[in-house]
Amino acid sequence: MQNHPQQIAQSILTGFERHFSFFQEISSAARQRFENADWEAVRDASAKRISFYDLRVQEAIEKLRANFDIEVLNEGLWQQVKQLYTGMLKTHSRPELAETFYNSVFCRLFDRRYYDNDKIFIESQVNRAELSERYRVYMSFHLADGGLSGIILDILSAFYFSLPYEEIKRDCGLVAESLLYQTGFDQLPNDLRIDVLESPFYRNKAAYIIGRIVYGEKVRPFILPLINNEQGSLYVDTVLIRGRHVEAVFSFARAYFMAKTPVPTATVEFLQSIMPYKTLAELYNSIGLHKQAKNEFYRDLLNHLEVSDDLFVTAAGTPGLVMQVFTLPSFPYVFKVIRDRFPPQKEVTHKLVKERYLQVKKHDRIGRMSDTLDFIDVALPIERIEPSLLQALQETIASLLEYDGDMLVIRHLYIERRMTPLNLYLQDANETQVRDILDDWGLALKQLMGVNIFPGDLLFKNFGVNCQGKVVFYDYDEVCYLSECNFRKIPPPRSSYDLYRDEPWYSINPNDIFPEEFITFVTTDPKIRKILMEIHPELFDFAYWRSAQENLAAGIQADVFPYSQKLRFKRTEPDVLKIAKTG
């Protein structure tokens, strides 16, 4: 077989186009799923979409192997292939994604010692600003064209949903009144306009109109969550224009949005205009392009290592029995590696741990489970690793380590946002903070129940507190579906002798769980136990957990909003319009 660099480059690009067509097809169908209130299909599509990328990369590799002689690397050939591929992307509308796809194909074919900028796209060659200018992905609505209520009506009418609004004039009034209240304007600037992305973003049970308010040099977010009332119509649930509320909507602890993004760079540029503190990796992740997010994240890490000088150290918190966890203090993430060996009390395998992390990635995380990025062959400078951490890595994950000159290569690791471990937060919190965070911990468990998740290990060390003061679960080695559990009440002792036995007097099967024991092992602090029993006593009652299972079996899906209930419009009194006065 002859190797023609032009044909190899074209074959890889064709593989990418096939991948993106599948990605767009399932993302575009989100509108129909939302209009049909088919929430089961929403969850299935979200999980299915995540697996698309790896399948298409493998297909592209198999096609290359069938048509070309590429088992042994010819460096000169692949330098030509990259040059030709780069030329093909000059007029492409998704070049950054195509670069990443190319990298994935090459890196699965060849050893990491060949990963240099001559053969793969370590540095992107995409002009993002030019792409964003060339492709306009939003619509603009000007105040001068019809007043505030008028342009809101135009915005709501612009998307042509098959379902009507319950009362579109009511919703326009609510949005306009809330905007005036939140902005504090006595009179709106004449040059005010609202830009909105051409495609709504879909997730869980809502569709989100994503936009920005522009006046003078100022830009503010503008997000309208739309709800299907499941009775044949829609309504606007609230309007979000404050940074912390938008941050919650785009949180790393929530599932990826479904949206039509024919020019992802332009969409990401728009999102960055309302969330300038977000990285490219976070924004690509938010629209479901998690492989692109990984690529951008790794570039961020390499760039950060160039401009920083602190050392990787063991992460704060109680050391895990399954994961070795470390962090770079100046970089807001933790790096988690599966240990070579587990203690006897951990009845898991390496394969099972990986399956559980993938299970969470595909699941509805509802703001309560941290997203993870998993990486293969991550090379870190040995001189940047604190000596005691290096020794710990050598002792705990030796099978996953490889030395390459002055670099330590870790064959597989997970990366998550760094948070304050809940057990450490409780140590430093005042009485009010303790009560509030314990209340949120209980709420987090209840919300996880509603999407069929049982954390397995409820110890506080397995939960973190994010920058918004919310509890997020992040240790997945014992996570399982709530429906798989058998919640039981502990049988009464048969005699006083039973109370002093070393072993339980009752039989315990693998999936048996006894909620009344939770209060005993989550904490030894009597004050914390007292607070938990006051604010969430039902969590320690097996009947409560069984009722949650019954709701799931009946098809009842939890309504979990990425913003406070206090922000939602009150629509119960049609004669007196009420709005949530957002704080």
Image (cartoon, helix red, strand yellow):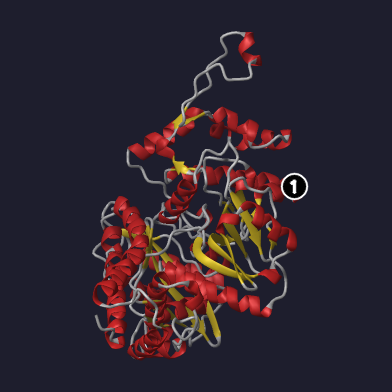
Left or right of residue 264: residue 473: right
Relative to residue 272, is residue 564 depicted above or below?
above
The residue sitting at the top extreme is: 495
x and y, in percent, of residue 36 in the image: 25, 56
In the foreground, 431 or 415: 415
Give the position of the N terminus as an image quadrant.
Answer: bottom left
- Which residue is labeled 1 in the image? 427
x and y, in percent, of residue 92 in the image: 33, 86
Residue pictured at 45% horizontal, 62% vertical: 238
x and y, in percent, of residue 582 in the image: 56, 62
Relative to residue 526, is residue 217 depicted above or below?
below
**Residue 275 visible in the shown view:** no
Task: Give the quarter of the image for residue 181.
Answer: bottom right
In the foreground, 423 or 571: 423
Which amino acid lies under the numbered mark 1 shown in the image of this protein? Gln
Give the position of the C terminus as an image quadrant.
Answer: bottom right
In the foreground, 305 or 281: 305
Tell me the crowding category of disc 1: few under 14, some 14 to 19, or many 20 or more residues within 10 angstroms, Cα based: few
Task: Give the quarter of the image for residue 453.
Answer: top left
Left or right of residue 563: residue 46: left
Task: Give the quarter of the image for residue 154.
Answer: bottom left
**Residue 86 visible in the shown view:** yes
Relative to residue 271, is residue 540 depicted above or below?
above
Residue pictured at 55% horizontal, 15% vertical: 492
In the foreground, 24 or 200: 24
> Which SS class for mark 1?
helix
x and y, in percent, of residue 291 in the image: 43, 69
Residue pictured at 67% horizontal, 44% vertical: 435
